[in-house]
Amino acid sequence: MPFNTPLPMLGGLTAAEFLGDYWQQKPLLIRGAFPDFECPLDPDELAGLACEEGIESRLVEEHGKRGPWQVSHGPFNERTFARLPEQDWTLLVQAVDHYVPEVAELLKAFDFLPPWRLDDIMISYAPPGGSVGPHVDQYDVFLLQGSGQRRWQLGGKVADDVPILDGIDLRILAQFAVENDDDWVLEPGDMLYLPPGWSHHGVSQSDDCLTLSVGFRAPSADEAITSYADYLGEQLPSSRRYSDAGMPASQDPTEIDDNAVERMRGLILETLDDPAQLAQWFGRVMTQPKYADQLVPNEQPTDPAELVTALHAGETLMRSPGSRFAWRPLDEARATLFADGDGAECPPTLARALAGDMPLDAKLLEDDGAAELLAALLDAGSLTWEGEFDESST
């Protein structure tokens, strides 16, 4: 997309301006980001999703029977909602874009950001007074008002060790004060962008308040180090070990001296400092599906010849809901396609087509090895035939 075109959803900013001045730096309130916005689902439909097995949902009651800020996890049932009061509770449903195609369509508006950075679209419903308390998220989020009104207050960027309330399942700030008059009521189509670490508090102002949260994934340093070390460890030969050939005699053999520490440090740094391996790990970790059990592998392997016949007959493939794709060039003739935490080598044109939003039809077969790769992705559940998802979800 053109990065210097003003975007209404960014309040007239270009993508370049937003990325340079706001992304991961400071909040942005955008009135009318999505003019005449109509929410793809209503509160009853959201509650219906929360009653289904396999869909992650939470219910937060500010004044629960078990104490303040009571958190329950779905699936729920009609009795759960029938007993709730008329205010001061919130229903949150994760990854609604995986189940409702109209919600997934909204992600196209955010194509100025890398798709492998996207996490999911969570939708929350709350009657008047409903909230999850003042808190901090450690990831970027766009808060789009779907229906009704929600009041948002911002308390500025806070430190990692900010005090939180004890004894509850939510990380609610022990203290919260509005800064710089950052206090607004959002109407349908309004949107608020928040960078990581920015304290905020959202409270429903109506009985039809639906808020769509477009969140982004950002592995923490401890998660990244552990994951990368595990990835390398699976590939390293057992012969690569600590070595101290030529070690000088020591007056005290029980001492771990600086030379020994430096030798171990060198082994670790030499092993970790491999840009090619880091890129392969990074592509895999950033395309891991949010819910691995959503991928449904084929029971019988796909015959590439039959796949070719079907594509030439006019059938098309689609990326499975919840699947993630990305790619990285290796050289002029080769690239790695990353799909749902795995990687496969293929021509760059094929990798780009599969990772992008191009139609998945017979044109893909122009690249060498396309039939075999498509068959493997079908078998893994990353791709499906057009129409199969619609049939399975009705």
Image (spheres, rainbow, N blue to C red):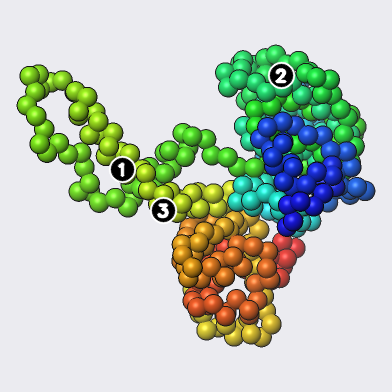
* Callout 3 crowding tier (Cα within 10 Å): few <14, some 14–19, many ≥20: few
Visible residue check, residue 392: no
Camera-side residue of 164 and 89:
164
Visible residue check, residue 274: yes
Sequence-earlier tag: 2 or 3:
2
- Give percent across and percent down for residue 31: 88, 38
> In the rendered view of the protein, which quadrant contains the C terminus?
bottom right
Give the residue pinned by disc 1. Answer: 270
Give the residue pinned by disc 3. Answer: 276
Give the residue pinned by disc 2. Answer: 68
Q: Quadrant of residue 131?
A: top right
**Residue drawn 57% across and 80% down?**
366
Identity of the residue furthest to the front in this view: 4
- Mark 2 and 3 residues: CB-CB less than 8 Å, in contact? no
Q: Residue 260 vs residue 314: left or right?
A: left
| 3D distance between C-alphas at marks 3 and 1 | 13 Å
Camera-side residue of 231 and 94:
231
